[in-house]
Amino acid sequence: MEDKIVVLSGAGISRESGLDTFRDRGGIWDQYSPQKVASIAGFRADPELVQEFYNMRRVELLSGKIEPNPAHFALSRLQGFLPNSCYIVTQNIDDLHSRAGSKEVIHIHGETLGSLCSFCGMRMRCETSISAADVCEKCLKVGGIRPDVVFFGEIPYHLPRVYELLKDCTLFVAIGTAGAVYPAAGFVDNAVRARKIEINLAATEISDLFDENRYGKASVEVPRLVEELLAEA
Ligand code: APR
């Protein structure tokens, strides 16, 4: 029987594409306070600071220097072989899975290249800076446009669908995530029927919950795993 696969990716999968992770030494949370730039309370206290933080993320992602790496491409290849039975659930707000050709990417923390109107809920693709002067194209109100990302203190997107996929999956693979932020850190417990594999540079807080731990770079370990899975299929 064909595997039903759920891949959970975190910042580590995009590290070799040139994007900083959050909790590694020198990572984003060493440079900025998550409470100030990425929480709903921080956004209410100083929206401009938060907009600036995500405006910079948008510039970085579109700089031409950030490209998908072999881990993103290998997952896209796997999805191509297993249409409708391989889902990528990502905590990442970058678009590197899609740029590598992946079709089924579930962004539970939103997307850097998206805007959301706090007044009417209108979502748009956004490749430019967002400011307090922006007008929503739908409701025409000023000052409600924000990044379409999930701040600390908000509920991640698409959770009912993710839990449904986890319940049925036969293989769960977590790649490049420290397992420090819930609910994603708890997904491994919801994959009750699955063989569970963790890929990371080193052991994490949740390594014990997996059947297998493969330590190494995502750009090496993910293509290796995908080759194994395709050979078994
Ligand atoms: N290959 C594999 N793993 C790697 C690599 C690599 N090249 N580089 C780093 N890692 C691992 C690190 O060892 C670490 O365990 O990736 C993990 C990154 O952890 P975090 O920086 O905490 O990122 P993540 O788990 O995705 O964070 C979850 O926290 O603040 C947030 O909203 C943000 O979505 C993010 C969430």
Image (tube, rainbow, N blue to C red):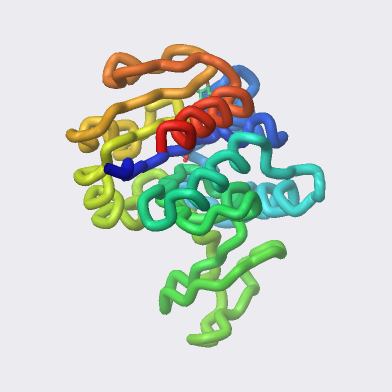
> Of 71 and 158, which appears nearest the observer?
71
> What residue appears at the point 41 percent right and 46 percent down from the top-left corner?
89
Q: Is residue 77 above or below residue 69?
A: below
* The C terminus sits in image quarter: top left
* Left or right for 102, reference 203: right
Residue 49 seen in this snapshot: no
Residue 111 seen in this snapshot: yes
> Of 21 and 6, which appears nearest the observer?
6
Q: Residue furthest right?
A: 64
Q: Is residue 62 above or below residue 13?
A: below
> What residue appears at the point 40 percent right and 48 percent down from the top-left corner?
86
The image quadrant of residue 114 is bottom right
> Of 82 and 199, which appears nearest the observer?
82
Q: Is residue 26 above or below residue 88?
A: above
> What residue appears at the point 41 percent right and 23 percent down from the top-left corner?
198
> What residue appears at the point 65 percent right and 64 percent down from the top-left corner?
130
List x then y, in percent, for residue 112. Answer: 59, 54
> Of 133 and 85, which appears nearest the observer?
85
List x then y, in percent, for residue 187. Answer: 28, 36
* Left or right for 224, reference 69: left
**How many badges with numbers are in the image?**
0
Q: Is residue 223 above or below residue 76?
A: above
List x then y, in percent, for residue 182. Answer: 32, 36
* The N terminus sits in image quarter: top left
List x then y, in percent, for residue 210. Answer: 31, 21
